[in-house]
Image (cartoon, coloured by chain):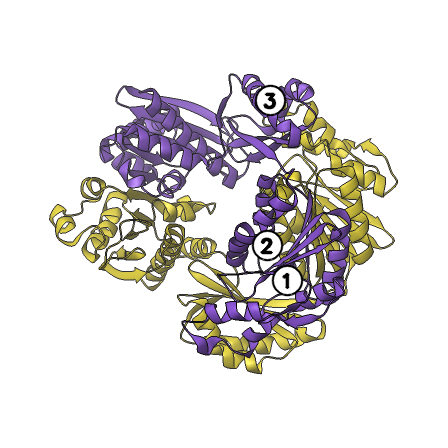
Chain colours: A yellow, B purple
Amino acid sequence: MKAAIITIGDEILLGQILDTNSQFIARELTKLGADTVEMRSVGDTRAEILSALEGAFKIADTVIITGGLGPTKDDITKNALAEFFHTSLEFNPQVYTWLEELFAANPARLNAYNKTQAVLPACCTPLRNLKGSACGMWFERNGKIVVSLPGVPFETEYLLPAEVLPRLKQQFPQLQLSYQVFTVYDIPEAELAMRLEPFERTLSADIKLAYLPSPGFVRLRLTAKGQAVEKLPVATAELQRALTGLSFTLGEESTEDFCAKQLQKLGRTVACAESCTGGNIARLITSVPGASSYFLGGIVSYANEVKINVLGVNKKDLETYGAVSEQVALQMAEGARRVTGAEFAVSTTGVAGPDGGTPEKPVGTVWIAVAGPHGAIAKKFLFSRTRERNIGKASVTALRWLVQVVQKA
Amino acid sequence: MKAAIITIGDEILLGQILDTNSQFIARELTKLGADTVEMRSVGDTRAEILSALEGAFKIADTVIITGGLGPTKDDITKNALAEFFHTSLEFNPQVYTWLEELFAANPARLNAYNKTQAVLPACCTPLRNLKGSACGMWFERNGKIVVSLPGVPFETEYLLPAEVLPRLKQQFPQLQLSYQVFTVYDIPEAELAMRLEPFERTLSADIKLAYLPSPGFVRLRLTAKGQAVEKLPVATAELQRALTGLSFTLGEESTEDFCAKQLQKLGRTVACAESCTGGNIARLITSVPGASSYFLGGIVSYANEVKINVLGVNKKDLETYGAVSEQVALQMAEGARRVTGAEFAVSTTGVAGPDGGTPEKPVGTVWIAVAGPHGAIAKKFLFSRTRERNIGKASVTALRWLVQVVQKA
C-alpha cells in the first residue's frame, strides 16, 4: 500500500513550527508495512489543500492529512474535503454528543466555535477524538482512503493508532511487516555500528537494520516485509547473539515506562536527590501514571546549602572534594533515602554546562550514586558537551541503574 | 517571491529521521519576506526528484532542495538536476581546489568518492561549503532559481545564510517582511479567538494573524509583507489594546527563558515544592544555563510522609483537607522556603490523572501556592483531562505566577 502525507498549516510554511506529525505518521505507516511515497506541507487555503489532495490521490492508496481543523482555522480542511468528495457539510448529532461528553466537566467552555466542530462532510466516518474537540474523518473513494486528523501532535498521536491504523489493516489485509526493536544502552552509535558489521554482512538482504540513536541509548530495528517476515525470528536471535555483553532490552518502551513497570512489580520504594539533572529524574518517574505507589519523592539540591541542610551532606566534604564528587553523590543518595523514608535512592551531581567545567571536571562529568538498605555506591560518567544532552543522559543512566540495584536487592 | 522546498531522502519517508531542514529553510525565507508555498519530501530516486522539481518549478520562483548529494547516495540529485536543466555533468576544477583545501589537514582522506563531488551539472554556479565535501549549486532559468544543498542539517545551516540568502536578496530586491509575536497566558485558544473577533474584523487584509497554541499559553503572530510593513506598528498597538486585561508578553521566548531572564535581573532566590508536577518545575528552571544564581532547590513531595517530614506540612491538615487543598499547597510553599532558605517558593498539589479524580476534585484540579517574605497565597486551577497536559500546564502556570510575585515584591 502506498501512502502520502499532507500537513496543512501556514505556521509550518512560515517555519514557525516543526512538522513532527509527518514523521510520526510515516513511522507508524512503515511499521504497518506501508510505503510512504511523499510528504507535503501546504498552506491554510482551500486551493492549496485541494491541489495537494489531488496530487496525493494520484500516487497513493491512502492519504493522511493533518491540520486545518481547529475553530480558528475556519475549518478549511473540512471545506476542501467536502469539495473533493462532492458532498456538503452537515451537522452530525453523534459528534455533538462526543463534544458534550468531552466538555462534561466544564460545559460553559462548549461555545459556538466548538459547536461548529460537529459539522462535517456528509460522506465521512467520524473518528472519535478523546484528546480534543476536532474529530478525525475517514473517507473512501474507489478503494482509496483519505483520513483527516487534527494538527495538534498530541491529538494525532492518539487518533492514528487508536482509530486509523486498525481500519487501515482491515482495508489492506495484505500489508505484512514484522519488526523487532532492541534498546541498547551505554554504547555510542558509531561503536555499535562497528561491532555489528559482521552481523550486518550476514543479514539477509530483505531484512533491514536501522539505527535510531537517542540520548542515553540506541534503538535498533530489524524490519522484514512480505515474504521475509518468516526470517525475522532467526535474524532476531542472531542480533541478540551479536549484542552479547552489552546492556540491552528487547522492545521500544521508553526508559521511564520500562523502569516504572519493574518498580511496580518489585514493590519497593524509591526516591532521588538531584543536582545537575535538576528535577528531570523525578519528572521522568512521575510522568508514568501510578508512580505514587513506588516513588516517595525527591530533593533537587541545586544549592550547596540544600545539600547540607536538607540532605545532610557534610559541609567539610563539600569543601574538600567539591559538589561534583563521589563523596557528595554518596551522601546525597543516602540523604534522600533518610529524609523520604524510601528503601532506595539515586543521586546525581555533575557539570551540566555550558559553564562550570574545569580541566579535572570538564562539562559532562557526572557522579551518580545509588543507596539501598545494604549501602551505597557511586560511579563517575563523562557524558556530553551540551547541557540538554548531559541532563538527558544522566537522568536515563541514573534511573536505569537505580532499577538494576533494586532488582538485585 | 514564492518559494518551494524539497527534501530528499528515504530515511525521511520511513519516519526514521525528522526533517528539520525544511523548517530551518522556511524560517529563513520567511525572515527574508519570501512566501514558502509548499514543502515536499520525496525518496532517493531520479524520477521522484524530477517530478517534485517540475511540480515546484510551476508554483514557485525559487526552489530549494536538500539531500541526495552524498557519495553514498550515488549523487542522485545531481543527475536529476542535470536532466532537468538539459545539461551534462562536468568536472569543475574550482570545486576540486575547494576539496583539496578542505582536506588539507588530512589529504589521504580525499578519496575517489570525494573526487566525484567536483563533478557538477555544467550550467550551475557552485556554492562553496566550508563545513563538508558536497558543495551547494545555484541554477537559473527564465528568472527562476533552483538551489541544491546537502542533506546534513549542519551543512545546510551554514550554506543557506552564507551563500544562498544574500544571492536571493540580490535577485529579489523587493522582498520585505515584518512581524510581531505575542505570548498570551491563561486563556484557551477558542476563547481568545472569540475575544479577538472584533480585532480581526478590523485588521487590514494584508496583515495576517496566526494562532500557535502550546500547553499553558497561546502565541499570536502578526505578519506584514511588502507595503503592509508600515501598518504593523498600528496593528500591534491595536492587538495590545484588544488583549487588555489578559496576561501576555510581547515576544516569543519560552516561559522558562522568560522567567529565567526576570529572575536573573531581580536577583532574588527561589525554590519549589512539587507534588503533581513531579519535578517538572525544577526541570524547567534548571534547563536554562545559569539557574544556580537564583534557584536554590526543590522538593518533590510525592508521598504524604515527604510533605510532612521534609516540608513540615501539618498531618492533621493533610487528613482533614486532603493533599489537594489550599492548606497543603500553602504549607508546601512555606516549607520549601524554610528548608531551602530561598526568599520565594512555589508549590503544586493536584490530581494529574488519569486516576485519582473525584467529583469534588476531578482530574486536572491543581492548587498552586506562592510564598514569599510577606506571606503566602494559593489559587485553585482546573487544567486538563490528561496527565501530560496537566503537568505541563500546572508547571508553566506555577512558574509564571512565582515570577510575577517576585516582580511585585
> Can residue A112 be seen in this snapshot?
yes
Callout 1 secondary element: loop
Contact (CB < 8 A) between labels 2 and 1?
yes
User: Position of A250 compared to A188: left or right?
Assistant: right
Q: Which residue is mark 1?
A: B9
Residue at the spot of label 2? B19
In the image, B13 versus A269, the foreground residue is B13
State the image coordinates of residue A166 (x, y, percent, origin top left): 71, 54
Please give the chain letter of the residue carrying mark 1: B
Q: How many labels were placed on the picture?
A: 3
Labels 3 and 2 touching (C-beta < 8 A): no
Residue A195 in sight: no
Q: Tell me which numbered mark, 3 or 2, is placed earlier along the sequence.
A: 2
| Coordinates of residue A399 in the picture (x, y in percent) | 37, 55
**Nearer the observer, B368 or B183:** B183
**Which residue corresponds to mark 3?**
B235
Dot 3 surroundings within 10 Å: few (below 14), some, or many (20 or more)? many
In the image, what residue type sits under mark 2?
Answer: Asp
Q: Which amino acid type corresponds to the residue marked 1 in the rendered image?
A: Gly
Chain letter of disc 2 in the image:
B
Residue B23 position in % (x across, y down): 59, 48
